[in-house]
C-alpha cells in the first residue's frame, strides 16, 4: 500500500527525497494498511534533535479500544542525527520546507518519503495544468486517427 500526497506534488517543487521510518501504534498500522490516511496538510517539523510528522490524518481503526485517540497527533520520524542536522541546515532561511510525499510499506515497516520542497508560484501551477491538458489532447487526437 502506497499513499501519495498529491497536494504536495501540486503545490511544491520537490528538490530532494529522503526515506525516514515512522513510529506507529498497532491500530495506526492497520488504518494505514486499509488506505485511510490523508497527508494533504501534513509537514515535517524538526524539534531539538528529533523530526516529527505533524498534522498527518491517520483515523482510528474501527475495532480498536483506544477512546482518547487523536488522528492528527505528531508522530516521530526515525532519522540519523547527521540527516537531521543536514535537513536543518538546508531548510533554515532558504524558503524550503520538509513535506511528506508518500507513506509506503517496506519489509513490514512503514516509511515516509520526505521531500525537501520549494513552494510553486501560481503561474507555475497553471503552466503544469496547461501542459497536462495539451498532452491529453494530443493523445486523444492520436487515438482518434488510428
Image (cartoon, rainbow, N blue to C red):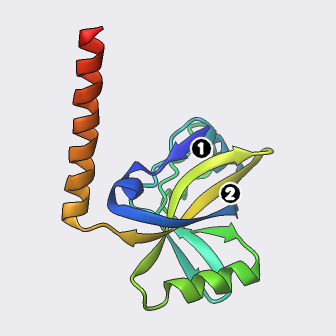
Q: Position of residue 63 (x, y in %)?
A: 61, 37
Q: Position of residue 81 (x, y in %)?
A: 75, 82
Above or below, 3 relative to 95: above
Q: Position of residue 113 (x, y in %)?
A: 60, 58
Closer to the camera in the image, 37 or 91? 91
Judged from the image, the secondary structure of the residue bearing numbered disc 2 is: loop
- On the image, numbered disc 1 is attached to which residue? 32
Q: Residue at the spot x=52%, y=51% of the render?
A: 58
Closer to the camera in the image, 26 or 110? 110
Q: Residue at the spot x=72%, y=72% of the render?
A: 79
Tell me the number on the disc at residue 53.
none
49 to the left or right of 128: right
Crowdedness near tag 2: few (<14), some (14–19) or many (≥20) residues, C-alpha within 10 Å: some
81 to the left or right of 90: right
63 to the left or right of 132: right
Q: From the image, which quarter does the C terminus lie in?
A: top left
Q: Mark 2 and 1 residues: CB-CB less than 8 Å, in contact? A: yes
Q: Residue at the spot x=47%, y=55% of the render?
A: 57
- On the image, numbered disc 2 is attached to which residue? 24
Label 2 or label 1, whichever comes before in sequence order: 2
Judged from the image, the secondary structure of the residue bearing numbered disc 1 is: helix
116 to the left or right of 6: right
| Quadrant of res 117 | bottom left
Which residue sits furthest top?
A: 146
Above or below, 120 relative to 24: below
Amino acid at each position: 500500500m502506497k499513499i501519495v500526497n498529491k497536494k504536495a506534488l501540486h503545490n511544491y517543487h520537490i528538490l530532494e527525497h529522503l526515506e525516514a521510518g515512522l513510529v506507529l501504534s498497532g491500530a495506526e498500522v492497520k488504518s494505514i494498511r486499509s488506505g485511510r490516511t490523508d497527508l494533504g496538510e501534513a509537514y515535517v517539523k524538526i524539534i531539538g534533535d528529533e523530526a516529527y510528522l505533524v498534522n498527518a490524518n491517520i483515523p482510528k481503526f474501527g475495532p480498536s479500544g483506544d477512546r482518547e485517540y487523536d488522528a492528527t497527533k505528531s508522530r516521530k520520524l526515525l532519522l540519523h542525527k547527521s540527516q537531521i542536522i543536514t535537513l536543518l541546515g538546508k531548510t533554515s532561511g532558504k524558503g524550503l520546507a520538509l513535506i511528506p510525499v508518500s507513506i509506503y510499506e517496506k519489509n513490514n515497516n512503514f516509511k515516509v518519503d520526505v521531500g525537501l520542497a520549494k513552494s510553486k508560484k501560481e503561474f507555475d501551477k497553471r503552466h503544469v495544468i496547461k501542459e497536462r491538458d495539451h498532452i491529453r489532447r494530443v493523445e486523444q487526437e492520436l487515438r482518434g486517427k488510428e
